[in-house]
Amino acid sequence: MRTPVIGVMGGSKATPTVTEMAHELGTLIAQHGWILLNGGRNSGVMAASAAGAKSAGGIVIGILPDTTRAKASPDLDVAILTGTGDGRNLFNVLSSDIVVACPGALGTLAEVVLALKHNKHVVLLGFDLGSDFDKFRNKRQLTHADTPGQAVDLIAAALNTAGA
Amino acid sequence: MRTPVIGVMGGSKATPTVTEMAHELGTLIAQHGWILLNGGRNSGVMAASAAGAKSAGGIVIGILPDTTRAKASPDLDVAILTGTGDGRNLFNVLSSDIVVACPGALGTLAEVVLALKHNKHVVLLGFDLGSDFDKFRNKRQLTHADTPGQAVDLIAAALNTAGA
Amino acid sequence: MRTPVIGVMGGSKATPTVTEMAHELGTLIAQHGWILLNGGRNSGVMAASAAGAKSAGGIVIGILPDTTRAKASPDLDVAILTGTGDGRNLFNVLSSDIVVACPGALGTLAEVVLALKHNKHVVLLGFDLGSDFDKFRNKRQLTHADTPGQAVDLIAAALNTAGA
Amino acid sequence: MRTPVIGVMGGSKATPTVTEMAHELGTLIAQHGWILLNGGRNSGVMAASAAGAKSAGGIVIGILPDTTRAKASPDLDVAILTGTGDGRNLFNVLSSDIVVACPGALGTLAEVVLALKHNKHVVLLGFDLGSDFDKFRNKRQLTHADTPGQAVDLIAAALNTAGA
């Protein structure tokens, strides 16, 4: 049984509320023994979720748009450097067993869409999307959480289903 | 003054109605003297829009997910082979001055989101998206057309604005 | 019969001699009716070969490492924007029927190696490589030209062989 | 002080001798406390080096050309899935602090060239390259080892130099 990889997506700019939420999410992911994977930059949801996971002794992998570590979070165990810019969003999604999206802008929305396309379960944490996505809600591929604790419960349930 | 490049996105599977619409759109793009750029495969909206443009003497560029021309439309003037799978969607968007999205599935939606993120004008042809996208409608970055003729008018207007 | 695409690789910095050679190569490629494909930037072998082809009325496609046209040669008919940095070297090679390498640095060498790996015929123009490449010389996949005229003869011969 | 990441490149097909060498190299990398990064497939140098590292309790990251884990080595701690084919070779190189190349074919040579281009120290293990690479030998960016033990000594020395 390999360790699940949980992808955490979200804005590179984040309000204090979202930052705190991403930090708690990272902490809980690490406490469950899962690997946290994100976009690796030292800003917004990426930095906060990495710091949270690290504070709980977890493993953090960042897949960066850059060719160097100059903008990498200091909390990464491994920085995957791609030099592909936004192209790395697809790698984040493909490499995650489950994707959690925190509030963000179009980059986050693109990752949600890519994740659904590649048959990943997506948890929306702290925000929701409109009726364009009802089809995925109805088959429970897309779920919604108000708190990091709820998100982690949804992750656990989705991992159980995938492993069944 | 370089020739504008119009990106045409849409499903690799298409109904007869959508296929006909994509063919007419390609024809009109070529008649306006614009270069048509799409995903290059010999199926759905890609094949139909390429065939339409070619029938009107236009230039067609396809950016393919593949490493070979095996699945390429015969109507391409140049096949850009990338071997990046869905990763090529970003290249399509970046390389287009204006993006027209015909009905499709999640791949098309991902391209719409990427196009908006990279500040491209997007015309939705024959379908619409929900309230998640109101922000882009309100600033006229996202517009809607019912017919290929309307789409081409919106393209022309957006090119004028961009060139101003 | 589609129009052959000839990839021209080489340094982004070039001596006057190499610049002149690349310009003449581009001119001859266009005069033969072939499409010229290169890395698209407005410098070195890329700029010179594009200008040569354009001066002879040819079609030039550039596959750029960038997300915008800011550094693109003004002589491109179509700029393929990828945002993948050096990652675009693979796309250049895959999209070319034949590859001509002008003198360059490690980027050019990497493209030669990738081209050989993907079974492309490679013409080295104005330089040569060492014994590591004898295997490809012996099966005539790798050839050497001293002048643009010779390079074009080798291209024509390789196209004939590939089309046979 | 973050943990160094050592990239191990080499053929997807390997002789028994090369397989044994790659396995021992992986073991030694893990025993030194370094993270092993490779191309992630369950064949050749990739599979052997991963198995070696895992047998010594190390951490193994694989960056795969694929969109799924179907061809992944069972010894990976994290599989980075890219769907970029050979395009992932660049990511391997960028993400490694030091690159060790075991005997391979053109893919391995391409990785050596890319690594040199991106200023990585490269250790050639069990083979050598010709005079095209003298420039990099002379400045000690390219070194040669006959055994995994020697390779690990060269890695340690290069890490010391880089960290100085």
Image (tube, coloured by chain):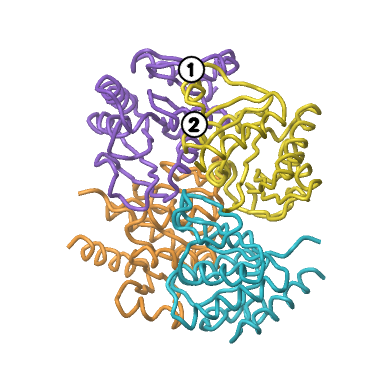
Chain colours: A orange, B cyan, C yellow, D purple
Q: What chain letter is assigned to the residue under label 2?
A: D
Q: Residue at x 53, y 76 (%)?
A: B102
The answer to which of A9 and C22 lies nearer the viewer is C22
The residue at the far left in this view is: A164
Image coordinates of residue B146 in percent, x first then y, are 59, 87
Q: Quadrant of residue C121?
A: top right
Q: Amino acid at mark 2?
A: Ala
Question: Quadrant location of residue D59?
Answer: top left
Where residue D115 appears, x then y in whole percent? 52, 30
Q: Secondary structure at mark 2?
A: helix
Image position, residue C55 (x, y; %): 81, 46
Q: Relative to residue B41, is residue C76 drawn left or right?
A: right
- A60 lies left or right of B139: left
Quick one: D65 or D2, which is closer to the camera?
D65
Give the residue at mark 2. Answer: D110
Decide which of C64, C26 is in the foreground and name it.
C26
Label 1 secondary element: loop
Q: CA distance from mark 1 to mark 2?
A: 12 Å
Disc 1 designates what residue? D129
The disc, 1 or 2, on the residue closer to the chain's N-terminal end is 2
The disc at residue A55 is none
Q: Is residue A123 left or right of residue C152?
A: left
**As drawn, B153 above or below D41:** below
**How far across and down, in percent of the image, does residue C16 sit?**
81, 28
Question: In this figure, what is the number of numbered marks?
Answer: 2
**Which amino acid type is shown beneath numbered disc 1?**
Leu
Crowd band around label 2 with a 10 angstrom C-alpha radius: few (<14), some (14–19), many (20+):
many
Residue at x-position 51% and y-position 68%: B47
Residue farthest to the bottom? B146
- Above or below, B42 against C93 in this view is below
What residue is drawn where x is 51% and y is 48%? A64
Rendered-image quadrant of the C terminus of chain A: bottom left
